[in-house]
Amino acid sequence: MESSARSFLDTLLSTPGVSGYEQAVQQIVRDYVSSFADEIDTDLHGNVIATLNSGGAPTLMLDGHCDQLGMIVSHIDEAGYLFFQTVGGWDPQQLVGQRVTVWTSGDPIHGVISRKAIHLLTDDEKKRVVDPKDMWIDIGATDGEDAASVVAIGDAVTVQLGIQEMRNGLANAPAMDNRTGVWVVFEAMRRAAAKGVSCKLVVASTVQEEIGLRGARTAAHGIDPHVAIAVDVTHATDCPGIDKRQRGVIDLGEGPVIVRGPNINPRVGARLEKIATSDEIPFQIAALGRAAPNDANSLQVTRAGVATGLVQLPNRYMHSAVETIAFSDLNAAADLLAGFAGALRAEDSFVP
Ligand SMILES: [Zn+2]
């Protein structure tokens, strides 16, 4: 990974994106793509859409959702504690004991999420799964007035951001889902731009995937692609307790996952496999027997239908503060998508 590309990833992973419009992420993406995209637009929802070779055909859209799981402040009590709603599908047990940042209109505010100490829990409370309603954020406020002087109802909250490197090219951070996907699609564009493309390549950082695949829906309608590929994380199955009989063998570091199933145009899927094989890019295959629980779902049923692919990045501990990935998988995915874009021709048919 080149150092500028690596610093783009680090910046993506230290930037909050849970407000719904993701203004902070927009700016980082725009700064990075400005040196190689021909055009950059931000739509009404905050989707950032970068275009290369706008006179080319067909139109290929690459999609990575830029929003992350978080919280939103719903109440400030008289003692100055913050209560919250969750944004996206948290396992609430992952939240207890987290350091958090409240993204206010002024400076970010630090705090912790907690509940009563174990010594003070009743026997019944110890047995029950903790409910987000029974947790609070402590920012060190003296009282409600002090808290309300810096925090507003509706402010976004994330767990403490930032990447931590591990052994053998692995790393953990919150929001690997799906800043890694955002990194892959724009890095693929940078690599494709260096070699030239004959297609019109449109790369989108989309919003609001975690609350219903909403940004991809409007972005794809506007872009009107012939072919679209979503890049998102998937569950690695190389940690304890996961049923490989259902989910297959998906290992960190063994390459991006090319998905097969009804959400995937078979010609797009086969072409991804062919390019990976001919370019000697490692890849893994996974089955998905239903509509995808990610942007590939929205992309496929846009307008009169879009030939859709799904490339996934193996991820351990999804929807936690310690989502873990392998750098080599991101790199290989960027090569795969750059190769796909470079090989696409106007006469290619994707009618199955
Ligand atoms: Zn995701």
Image (cartoon, grey):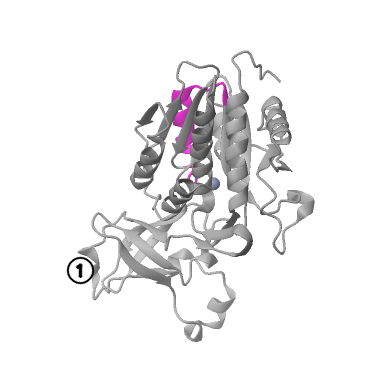
Quarter of the image with the C terminus is top right
In the current view of this chain or complex, which residue is farthest to the bottom? 119
Q: Within the magenta stretch, is there residue 221?
A: yes
Q: Residue at x 52, y 48 (%)?
A: 180
Q: Residue at x 45, y 38 (%)?
A: 205
Q: For mark 1, give the secondary structure.
A: helix
**Segment tinted magenta in the rendering:** 209-227
Q: Nearer the viewer, residue 21 or 23?
A: 23
Left or right position of 286 against 220: right
Q: Residue at x 50, y 33 (%)?
A: 189
Q: Position of residue 9 (x, y in %)?
A: 47, 50
Quarter holding residue 309 = top right
- Label 1 CA crowd tier, 10 Å (few <14, some 14–19, many 20+): some
Above or below, comparing residue 135 to residue 11 in the picture: below
Q: Position of residue 305 (x, y in %)?
A: 58, 22
In the current view of this chain or complex, which residue is farthest to the top? 347
Check disc 1 and give the amino acid type: Glu
Above or below, comparing residue 82 to residue 344 in the picture: below
Q: Nearer the viewer, residue 201 or 119?
A: 201
Q: Position of residue 11 (x, y in %)?
A: 41, 52
Quarter holding residue 229 = top right
Q: Nearer the viewer, residue 128 or 204?
A: 204
Q: Is residue 190 visible?
A: yes
Q: Position of residue 104 (x, y in %)?
A: 28, 57
The residue that disc 1 covers is: 145
Q: Residue at x 41, y 56 (%)?
A: 14
Above or below, comparing residue 18 to residue 266 in the picture: below
Left or right position of 332 against 319: right
Q: Within the magenta stretch, is there residue 75?
A: no
